[in-house]
Amino acid sequence: MDHESLKERTIAQQEERQKDYLVGYLGDKVSIDNLDLVLKTNFKEAFDPAKLAIRYTPLLSYYDYIVGDISADQLRLKGFYKDDRQAVATDSKIFTFEDYLYEYVNFGAPYFILENLTPRERPVHKNRHHRRRRPASNHPGKDKEQTASKAHEQHKPASPANKNRHRRSNHKKTTNNNSNRHQFTIKEKS
C-alpha cells in the first residue's frame, strides 16, 4: 500500500468517526456518546470538538477524567480515575496527571481535561480467570500409574562426575547406614 492510498484511507476513517461520535459543546459543557462532560482545563485552547470526535473511543467512557494533549497537530487521549476509586492502578488516578504531563507530553504542549460526570461501569467478565496449565500427569482420564512411571523413567540420576561439580567445599557429606542424605555445616567467617 503506497503513502497516498494510506492517507486517503485514514481521512475516510476519520470522517466516518466524526459522523459516529457527534460532539455537543456549549460553554464548558461537552457531550459525546451519551456522556456528560465538563471542560475543567483548556491549556492553550487545546480543546477542539472535531478532533475529539475523530479520536474518541468508547473505552474512554469508563474513566472519570479524559485528558487530551496535542503534539504534531495530533490529539492523544488518555483516561484517568478519581483518586478515591478502589481497585485501580495508582498511575491511572488523576493525582498522577502532573507526572503524566511531565513524562509523556511535550513541554508546553496544549492539553485539556474533561471530567466525566456519568462514567459507565466496566462490565464484569466471569470466565476471565488466568489459570495455570496442569501438567500432563494431572489430566483427568489418564492412568496415574502410567504417567508416574513415565516421569520416573525420564528423571535419571546425575553421574558422579556431575554431582561433584555442584558440591562446594563448605558442605560435608555424611553417610549413615540408614540414609543417604547430605548434611551441611555453616562456617563462620574469621
Image (cartoon, rainbow, N blue to C red):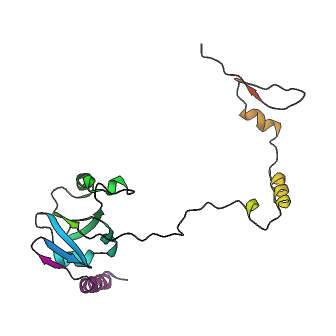
Residue drawn at x 80%, y 55% as measured from the top left: 151
Quarter in which the C terminus is drawn: top right
Q: Quadrant of residue 57?
A: bottom left
From the top left corner, tell me how far across and down residue 167 is, in percent.
73, 31
Depth check: give the residue in front, 5 or 15: 15
The answer to whether residue 152 is left or right of residue 18 is: right
Task: Tell me the residue at 86%/31% (across/down).
Answer: 179
Q: Residue 54: percent from the left, percent from the top?
A: 25, 78
Q: Is residue 132 above or below residue 180?
A: below
Quadrant location of the N terminus in the rendered image: bottom left
In the rendered image, residue 25 lying in the magenta stretch gets the answer yes
Q: Is residue 70 shown to the viewer in this render?
A: no
Q: Main secondary structure of the magenta part?
A: helix
State whether residue 98 appears in this view: yes
Q: Position of residue 155 (x, y in %)?
A: 80, 50
Q: Residue furthest top?
A: 190
Q: Vertical placement of 163 versus 126: above or below?
A: above
What range is drawn magenta here?
3-27
Q: Position of residue 133 (x, y in %)?
A: 64, 62
